[in-house]
């Protein structure tokens, strides 16, 4: 998921960035791509004591951890939320995707905001917003307020995640020390991946689902204190004007498509509302392409997609989040609703998946890094593909060994190949556009997660839940197979990633 990145080599500025949540959720893996873009151009800051730099790093890592933990814990708590607010499967999907949509939309423009404001200022403002939105989630009296609060969380996370690498680059101007700091930052993501399901399940069982949001409040306040006291501001500089028409049409297109996938599963794919949403999605997507092709300063320059290798890398990012995080969402729901097990036990059942993912990232990926991103991508995706095939045999509780083996192989593969997604994208694009490349990749990842949760959640909510599970697993397997095929065909060879 989000593990220790390799020593960054790009010379791109640290302003375009971002990762199930985990997306996070949301978001977690998504921030991995920022490391290369962020590390190369740190402006040398004042001489700082080891204690001060360490506490500045602690602030960044705590903010990063809080975002990722929130997303990974939420999947386990969703059935409890459904029971408490009397929601439906569609409601659960909205609780997840309403966070991812603004997160994906903000990522491409957060860099220019950081340029104008300064990374620390944006980090602190976003962290304060995320903490306040978390409190609102915990106190939500109904589903409407919860969904609105999750939307605010997504906006705040979109501003917070890209700034973490910029602050690290400012705090550690020495490349060697910076690489060590980014390793700590990345390991934080692995810790959140393991702690999220276990901690989320335990908190949900012992205190209730609201506690997974409430715990963000003291952590957020501590992080705000550390950031304001110990983190230095990054230099402010002029940046290009915001692409407001592109931003609006992009958000509407993504929101309408996700809404179609969610409501289509609930109301029927050919019902008037879903068809209207599909028409809106197609129309605004066409408008987005037209706007980006004609505006002087597009937030997504379409020319970058002329390189087949870059387009393949972006598709791989989409497929990774669709399969890896969509799978977590639908399996967590299936276990609790159809195996009738507690949230705490569900978290325990996901432990092999989480541990294998972290092992694949921290141990195997780093040991095999010399083979290059193509090798890591196709071999890791092959492991995840085999794991997905095993999951086709999952039915009742007596198939727990298949569930453990399948999810462990899938998690191991994701851990092996996910850190190399960014390296592959950057190998395929001009180094001058490395920051943009990371931003496009990470946005594609978030879009993939939103689409995966929307579609796989609709399938798992079918009247025949077992059929829905199998169709969902087939789609996940197709995603991993696509990564194998695209990586072998298009990802360039290089000795190191």
Image (tube, grey):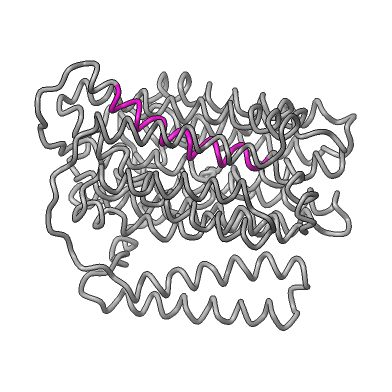
Name the foreground residue: 1 vs 409.
1
**Of helix, strand and loop, which mostly describes the magenta segment?**
helix
Q: Give the range drawn in magenta.
A: 55-75
Residue 350 pos. (x, y %): 69, 30
Residue 127 pos. (x, y %): 39, 44
Q: Does the magenta stretch include residue 311?
A: no
Asked if 249 appears above or below 173 in the picture, the reply is: below
The answer to whether residue 316 shows anywhere in this view is no
Q: Residue at x 43, y 70 (%)?
A: 250
The answer to whether residue 222 shows anywhere in this view is yes
Name the quadrant of the C terminus: top left
Q: Does the magenta stretch include residue 62?
A: yes
Task: Residue 89: name its quadrant.
Answer: bottom right
Residue 376 pos. (x, y %): 45, 32
Q: Residue at x 55, y 80 (%)?
A: 280
Residue 110 pos. (x, y %): 31, 55
Farthest residue toward the top? 50
Left or right: where 273 falls relative to 101: right
Left or right: where 14 falls relative to 279: left
Name the foreground residue: 384 vs 119.
119
Q: Residue at x 46, y 75 (%)?
A: 285
């Amino acid at each position: 998921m989000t593990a220790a990145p390799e020593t960054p080599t790009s010379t791109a500025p640290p302003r375009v960035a971002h990762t199930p949540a985990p997306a996070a959720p949301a978001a977690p893996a998504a921030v991995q791509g920022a490391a290369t873009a962020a590390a190369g151009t740190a402006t040398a800051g004042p001489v700082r004591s080891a204690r001060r730099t360490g506490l500045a790093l602690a602030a960044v890592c705590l903010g990063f951890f809080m975002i990722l933990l929130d997303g990974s814990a939420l999947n386990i708590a969703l059935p409890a939320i459904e029971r408490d607010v009397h929601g439906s499967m569609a409601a659960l999907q909205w609780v997840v995707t309403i966070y991812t949509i603004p997160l994906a939309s903000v990522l491409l423009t957060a860099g220019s905001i950081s340029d104008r404001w300064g990374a620390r200022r944006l980090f602190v403002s976003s962290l304060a917003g995320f903490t306040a939105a978390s409190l609102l989630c915990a106190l939500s009296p109904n589903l409407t307020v919860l969904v609105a609060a999750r939307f605010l969380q997504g906006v705040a996370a979109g501003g917070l995640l890209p700034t973490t690498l910029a602050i690290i680059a400012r705090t550690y101007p020495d490349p060697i020390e910076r690489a060590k700091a980014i390793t700590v930052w990345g390991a934080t993501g692995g810790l959140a991946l393991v702690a999220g399901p276990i901690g989320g399940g335990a908190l949900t069982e012992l205190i209730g689902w609201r506690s997974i949001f409430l715990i963000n409040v003291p952590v957020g306040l501590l992080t705000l204190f550390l950031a304001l006291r110990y983190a230095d501001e990054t230099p402010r500089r002029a940046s290009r004007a915001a692409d407001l028409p592109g931003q609006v049409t992009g958000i509407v297109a993504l929101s309408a498509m996700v809404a179609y996938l969610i409501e289509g599963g609930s109301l029927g794919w050919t019902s008037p509302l879903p068809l209207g949403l599909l028409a809106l999605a197609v129309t605004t997507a066409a408008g987005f392409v037209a706007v980006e092709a004609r505006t002087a300063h597009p937030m997504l320059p379409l020319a970058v997609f002329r390189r087949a290798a870059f387009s393949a890398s972006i598709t791989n990012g989409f497929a990774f989040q669709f399969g890896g995080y969509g799978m977590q969402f639908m399996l967590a729901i299936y276990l609790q609703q159809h195996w009738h097990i507690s949230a705490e036990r569900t978290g325990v059942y996901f432990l092999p998946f989480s541990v294998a993912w972290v092992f694949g990232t921290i141990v195997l990926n780093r040991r095999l890094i010399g083979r290059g991103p193509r090798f890591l991508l196709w071999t890791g995706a092959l492991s995840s593909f085999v794991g997905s095939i095993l999951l086709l045999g999952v039915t009742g509780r007596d198939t727990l060994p298949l569930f453990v083996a399948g999810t462990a192989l899938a998690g191991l593969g994701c851990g092996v190949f996910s850190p190399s997604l960014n390296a592959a994208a950057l190998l395929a694009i001009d180094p001058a556009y490395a920051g943009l490349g990371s931003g496009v990749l990470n946005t594609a990842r978030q879009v993939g997660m939103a689409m995966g949760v929307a579609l796989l959640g609709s399938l798992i909510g079918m009247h025949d839940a077992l059929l829905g599970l199998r169709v969902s697993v087939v789609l996940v397997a197709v995603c991993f197979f696509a990564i194998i095929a695209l990586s072998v065909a298009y990802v360039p060879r290089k000795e190191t990633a």
